[in-house]
Amino acid sequence: MRRALLLVDVQYDFLPPDGALAVEGGDGILERAVYPLLDDEQGWDLVVASQDFHPPHHISFASRHALPPFSSTVVVRDPRTGRDKEQELWPDHCVQGTRGCEIEEGVRARMDRLRRSRGEGAVVVVQKGTDLDLDAYSAFSPPLSHPPSAPAPLTQLLLDRGIEQLVVCGLATDFCVRQTVRSALSPFAPRSPSDKAPWEVLVVRDGCAAVDAKRGDEVLRELEDQGARVVGVEALLRGQSRTDEGAER
């Protein structure tokens, strides 16, 4: 079975103690799950790290709209569809060229080690939220420049590598992890929404942290209902996820 690990937004602005959008307990997933999963002996066929990568004055920044973050939303025009949509507003975060935008150094070091041992193609960083006027929570979200009739870049990468099992962890469960897993389960939507994913999707329960812990548990149940498997990191490290037998629920 060809397996890929997808790390969602393990960046300084989402990590305590100083991140602009720090997720409580987000740093705990590093030693508990992310670092062990990045050990070379796990034998991933591909490791992907998503990176929130916003330009200054991004559409999601409350400062752009002169409104307070978190509690405010605005109606904006979706540049893809031309329709109005509600946009959540956040503090400035993951701005290109800032430390907050960087992937956490321990993760970077382990990814670099995998590149040295397995080649440059063993690790791929997928940037999202790069368009000034378009937000993106999912690692599968294509930029505006991407042809609408083509599969998203991450979808195409997984297809090209023949991935059969996709393991997801990162930040935050109730936002970017949720949207990424939903996209992974329906990677051909909206072009072919009924086409099933050619890979199994696993979510690492203790490899994620939520902005709202209670909501995080609800999201994991929701993702299970939609077809993902929720597993513990120990099951993955023991190799139990490679078959249905012994998988944690």
Image (spheres, rainbow, N blue to C red):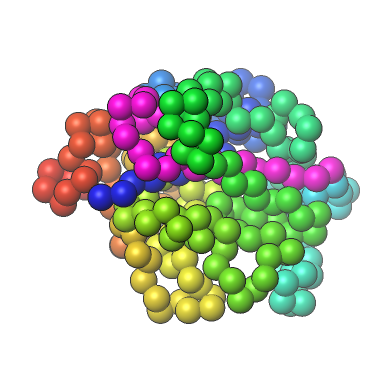
Could you say where residue 237 lies in the image, as x and y percent from the top left? 25, 31
Q: Residue at x 59, y 71 (%)?
A: 150
Q: Residue at x 47, y 38 (%)?
A: 122
Q: Is residue 231 found left or right of 117 in the rendered image?
A: left
Residue 140 drawn in magenta: no
Residue 53 drawn in magenta: yes
Could you say where residue 167 lies in the image, as x and y percent from the top left? 36, 45
For this rendering, which residue is in front, 13 or 48?
A: 48
Q: Is residue 6 found left or right of 18 in the rendered image?
A: left
Start and end of the magenta stretch?
36-56
Q: Is residue 133 among the parts visible in the rendering?
A: yes
The image quarter in which residue 239 lies: top left
Furthest residue to the left? 245
Q: Which residue is drawn at 50% across and 55% down?
A: 157
Q: Is residue 88 among the parts visible in the rendering?
A: no
Q: Is residue 203 found left or right of 152 in the rendered image?
A: left
Position above or below: 119 against 129: above
The image quarter in which residue 47 lies: top left
The image quarter in which residue 117 lies: top left
For this rendering, which residue is in front, 168 or 226?
A: 168
Could you say where residue 20 lies in the image, as x and y percent from the top left? 69, 32
Q: How many labels does the image show?
A: 0
Q: Residue at x 55, y 68 (%)?
A: 151
